[in-house]
Image (tube, coloured by chain):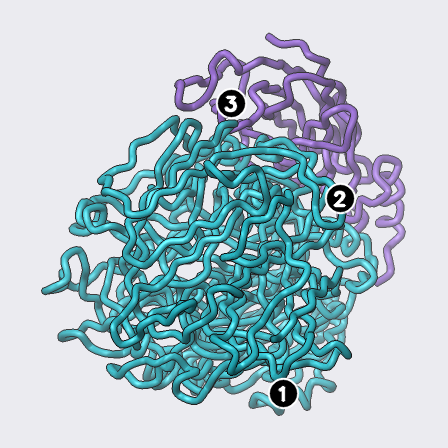
Amino acid sequence: MELSRRRVLWGLGATGVAAGAGLLLTRDEPPTPSRAGGEWTSFGTVALLDWSRRSLAASHDHAAGGHVHGGAATVLVPSAVHGAWTDAVSVHLQVHNGTHEPVELSPGQFRVRVAGGDVTVSLYGADRAAGPIAAGSTATFRIDYLVPPAGGLSLEFADAISMRTHQLGRLGEGSTT
Amino acid sequence: MNAPTRREVLAATGGVTAIAAAGVLVTEASASPQAAVTPTPGVLDLYVNEGLVRMVDDSLVYMRGFGSAPTDIGSPRPSLRISPQVFLADGRLVGSRSYPIGAALPTEGRPDPLAAHPTLPGQYLIRRRYWASFFPPRTIVAEVGSTVRLRVHNRLKRAHQLRIDGIADTGPIAPGGTATLAFTAPAPGTYIYHDPGGTSVERILGLHGVLVVVDPAQRWELAAGRAEFERQWVWLCQDVDPVWGARARAGEVIDPVATPPVPRYFMLNDRSGFRSLGVSDDALDSRTALEESLPSGSTRDFDVRAFNLGQAASTVGTGQLIRLVNVGAVVHQMHFHGNHVWTLRRNGADFPRLAGHVDVEGHAVLQQWEDVVELDQMDRKEIMLPIRRPPEVPERTWAARDEDWEYPMHCHAEPSQTAAGGLYPGGLVAHWTLAAPGPRVAHVHDTFPSQAAFASNQPHEGSPETLFPETPTKSFLRKFFNRRLVFPDGAEHEIWSFEDEASGRRFPAPLIRVTEGDMVHVRLEPSKRVHTIHHHGMEPDPRNDGVGHTSFEVTGSYTYQWRPDLGVPADPNNGASGLYFYHCHVNTVLHVQMGMFGPLIVDPIVHPAFPLAPGARRSFIDGPLYDIATETLLVPYALDPRWHTFEHAAGLSGEDVGLNRFDPKFFYVVGGLLNGPKGTADVSAPKQLRANLPGTGHPTLFRMLNANYFPSRARFTDTAGKPVEMAELIAHDGRAFRDTSRPGQPSKPVRDVGHPLRTDAIAFGAAERYDVLVHPPYRGTFLLHVDFTHWVTGRVLATRTIPVVAS
């Protein structure tokens, strides 16, 4: 199937952000997604608004009844006895869908990267389930991660449309609240 | 938009003809790929779609699938699988999650019994031909006599195809094209429909599903005259490689040989980990998992010699049928806790009950008990889960049972227990439930917001009490240790394992040897962190099964209690003698690889009709005598040195440490003589084996356990490499191979009725065990070669050869 001129133009408009934005190349849509603050993606922007880090060590583990609330998306119940990490990071994110179609977004697309290696970390919890972000709308997420007690951290976003990974910023080193 | 100009070609009217006709099926491109076609009564429309699928860690992975409606890749809800559909013999096509249509639906998937068993306390009479079964998405049920009519719409940019091997095939369907396929439902059984493009590529990317064919006159039987069941299940094993997904998305043509898949997610019926176990916060999804993936039922009397014997009016003594289907990339090893399962057939061929054989791959072809069922890529195996009293539960514990008992099922090719490189147990897992006696009790599970929350917070206790303690007749202590050990090749590796009071810190962990009927206590002292002991193949109550998420992990100490089942001569339903092993079940993928396992042997009781002889023993109650002095343990064990740098809880917090990637660099066969003097080496590994010649004494018994995560194959040859059929398989997973062909009649060992399982090769996947009698044909030296193969490619990674001296 040949691409129409309009589709090609649209593709060129988007590929400045994401060369591999296959979805957008096939759509008859306005050429440029709108954006909010933050990192450009294939569908708009994502931004790290805020983060906090805390030690859960004092609360020990599930058997001791230690839970952590406050600024977190979920009740964090790591098991120190089990050997799980007992520091946590909570991130506050903004996602803007600048296209004219809903975009599927899952909090699992965000991962924490541990500095000094190849290790990234899956989420512990989020205040939103996976689902579509409506066209032209902006949504916020809070996502929690267990993290190692020391070392630098950063946050990244895997754009499932462009298949690019975006660096969203450092989460500081060793600071706790 | 142009109007559609489809030309649909009816492929064929029956099975084989469909294949012959496949070459003419390619149709012109549809000019309306976005729109769903107008449904035609009796025809099932399948759309080859693509989309992003949420994995258990909430990441999105590109996949393809046969969906029920046209969707594009940007769809928030891509249609990549159909809801279950039923082709009835009367010509109707019915969308239904359950079958038989109109049969009673079991609440939460669990059939209720008809009544309490009149003579067996705590057991029940099972309703016969009463309950419907729920099926997972991707299932097509077809009654014998129906015509399966499919219309496949390819909405992608390359040709795709739908094939049921040996039955029907659309041939390549051009982009935008449609092909119609019609074939008469084949013989009752389980079939895979898939896109054979790229050999395995399109199937692994998601273009697969299951066809279940049922005889409408025998809707609760595998086939007419075959095994009857209470209800049935389809378990689809799937493996997902996001890198393949990304490459396919980018338009690459993937060569599965040049770049084999490296699965990062492992699913059963499209779920993994905590979602598969029905403990996610998503109540609807958890309930659906219960209905379509998690067997459950009341305890019943069970005899493997006949699954269709009525016990009383409207009742039958049988279990639940599971259709195991592997559409994934790796060899899976389905391990059941709590009950052994009975394997009935493979790939449409019924296993015999008497005249079995060992196939060219080295698998025993005979109906048999197994606690680990090997499932090769594209394999279909039907097994029966008995749902009977777990045989190693002491009497007082059984009598006090007042809650559901849950037992895990998981793949023992342990990297499949991970997700995103860690998150154990986040992969291909399930469980089955033995219902509490009495009225149904609502069982409330803890639920979890994520796999990381589940993996990082397994239940644990300090030094829990052993309930209903009995006076032990055999007691053992197992303490954790870690140490760098020197292996026979001079390499040093960090090993975690168990020691007892006298063993020293060696590998493998010391033998636990007991006799049927013993009251066994095994005291665990983890010393560091949390550990458990799972006595693999022993089937006690969940509290003594040593699995964290169904009981607890131990920080202080715990004494496991179990009593091996007593054997009865010629009885295939009882007896626990044989080879097992024990291992830690905490972060199992890592801890077993680190060395936390040891052999476990259950000797039979001595029956007057089968006495012992000096220097000889039997491996089961009416089994052959073997020579004690040359009894040998052989354990293939491959080691990935990268893993031996990890911490105790690696991966459990959600970090990707690559536990899905097992890349062994060292290959060993550990073990040795079981009854000889104990060596002083760090690692016991035989350099030479002994085998008695016929006529010089009782034969030698090799006890073979695969502690490797990938399949192994043992081959016997002469020194020139010529195969020698000198191995006789007498038992597997702790159960003797018996003649079970005559209901109600004695089931002698197959060797005693003229059908010994002689072979020169033995295939045994992860955690499988064989008891092997060795019959050298002449005095001299033979060779035992152990091939370590790859779980995806089947390539031989290494071979270790040990001389076998026959004298």
Considering the image in quadrants, where does the C terminus of chain B appear?
bottom right
Q: Residue at x 56, y 53 (%)?
A: B267
Callout 1: SS: helix
The lab-note entry on whether marks 3 and 1 share a chain reads no
Subunit of label 2: B
Q: CA distance from mark 1 to mark 2?
A: 57 Å
- Residues B602 and B110: in front is B602
Q: Colour of chain B?
A: cyan
Q: Nearer the viewer, mark 3 or mark 1?
A: 3
Q: Mark 2: give few (<14), some (14-19) or many (20+) Cα within 10 Å.
A: few
Q: Position of residue B452 (x, y in %)?
A: 55, 34
Point out which mark residue B323 bears: none
Which amino acid type is shown beneath numbered disc 2? Ala
Chain identifier, colour purple: A
Q: Residues within 10 Å of mark 3 (few under 14, many from 20)?
A: many
Q: Do labels 1 and 2 touch, CB within 8 Å?
A: no
Kind of residue indicated by mark 3:
Ala
Q: Residue at x 14, y 62 (%)?
A: B120
Amino acid type, label 1: Ala
Q: Which residue is tagged 2?
A: B491
Task: Return the disc, 1 or 2, that comes first in the chain's sequence.
Answer: 1
User: Which SS class for mark 3?
Assistant: loop
